[in-house]
Amino acid sequence: MPDAAADTAADTAADTAAPFDVHVRGTVFLDIVFTGLEAEPRLGTEVWTSGMGSCPGGIANMAVAAARLGLRTSLAAAFSTDAYGQFCWETLGEQEGVDLSTSHRVDGWHSPVTVSLAYGGDRAMVTHEHPPPTPDPVEVPPARACLVHLEAHPQPWVLRAEGQGALVFADVGWDSSTQWSPDVLAGLEHCYAFLPNHVEAMRYTRTDDADAAVSALAERVPVAVVTRGPDGAVAVDQTTGERAQAPGLRLEALDATGAGDVFGAGFLTATLAGWPLADRLAFANLCAGLSVQQFGGSLSAPGWGDIADWYSHLRLGPRTSATAELLRRYGFLHDVLPAEHGRAVRRAGATLAVRNDLPQGPAAPTGHA
């Protein structure tokens, strides 16, 4: 392990000139998540649920996931002045510690809303959205990295961030046209890392498996990562000559909403800290694995306290061949976990308990540690 791995990303970031570790921008949704459904709703019937949660969603998933891992996070987005927008503004800025100085408020605009119905280990979503009447500002604060949605023709703010020295980490969304035009990959010219899931990667590269897809992408971007859900991830880092794969964690999946965003935030955090590629993948897998054990997108993003709890239970629990392998794979956590308990930020209790009735697990904290 290099010396940089002995620090958390937050510690490493403190020595840099940039005021932020990561800048993100996009659309913030109010996510309303219904949990405990026994089956999908059917026309002409009424279904009762055992719980629900409300939280900022959309690009906020990535912002919250990064902030909970200690990254100094800046978010540029439009927020309505309606009650939904006010809730998201306060939750992100006051509770999660996300900097909103490049965001703006909009009068007379309905906040985008998504209702997510979680059941059967998956979810279905219904979304209502109107484009904001005012464009996003072009201002980009200096940051060590930025998170973007890949487009064939990069947005002006992405080019500005790249020009300021930010590492551009990109993902890509589902192509509803099912055409999967390779032209989209032209945008990788301005990216440092690309993190699609295996379906997206195979479709865009016209390959048959994740390994072939990541090899094809590595010819176009310095760091290529392909996630495979519960099967883990594979990656190639051309800047270091590393190639690695990490198996997924066999954890009970309750809701996969936002898991890809949490993976991306974990990988970015480990990259800024200078860890080896295999450890970056393992850490991102762990963050995503912990997130799917909870309901909701930003609600489920783990903090260092959640990671410390998992590692502690692993070390102190029964020793089996499976746990021995996990201890070997995640032994690097011993050196990177925050030394002081007070720095081990966990999921925010207010989001989980005060503003909704989503029950907490027995080990969940009542607020920031």
Image: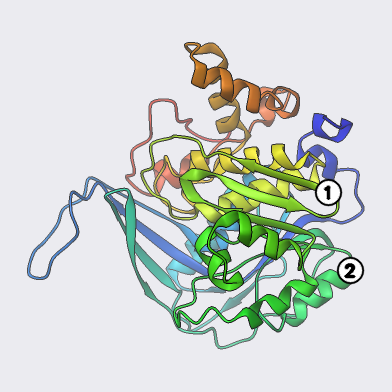
Furthest-bottom residue in this view: 133
Indicate which disc residue 164 carries: 2
Residues tagged 2 and 1 counted as in contact (Cβ below 8 A)? no
Q: Nearer the viewer, mark 2 or mark 1?
A: 1
> Tag 1, which secondary structure?
loop
Question: Which quarter shows the C terminus?
Answer: top right
Question: Which quarter shows the N terminus?
Answer: top right
Q: In this picture, is 235 found above or below 184?
A: above
Dividing the picture into quadrants, the one containing residue 54 is bottom left
Furthest-left residue in this view: 44
| Residue 5 horizontal/vertical position (percent) | 81, 33
Q: In this picture, is 133 found above or below 71?
A: below
Which residue type carries mark 2? Gln
> Tag 2, which secondary structure?
loop
| Residue 137 horizontal/vertical position (percent) | 72, 80
Mark 2, Cα crowd under 10 Å, few <14 / some 14-19 / many 20+, is: some
| Residue 121 horizontal/vertical position (percent) | 32, 48
* Residue at position x 72%, y 66% in the image: 101
In the image: residue 115, left or right of residue 301: left
**Could you tell me how far apart the alpha carbons at marks 2 and 1 are, in whole angstroms?**
26 Å
* Residue at position x 33%, y 38% in the image: 359
* Residue at position x 83%, y 75% in the image: 160
Residue matched to label 1 = 241
Which residue type carries mark 1? Gly
* Residue at position x 44%, y 44% in the image: 292
| Residue 154 horizontal/vertical position (percent) | 72, 80
Instruction: State the scheme by which the image is colored.
Output: rainbow
In the image: residue 149, left or right of residue 364: right
Q: In this picture, is 344 found above or below 237?
A: above
Q: Earlier in the sequence, mark 2 or mark 1?
A: 2
Q: Can residue 222 be seen in the rendering of this structure?
A: yes
Mark 1, Cα crowd under 10 Å, few <14 / some 14-19 / many 20+, is: few
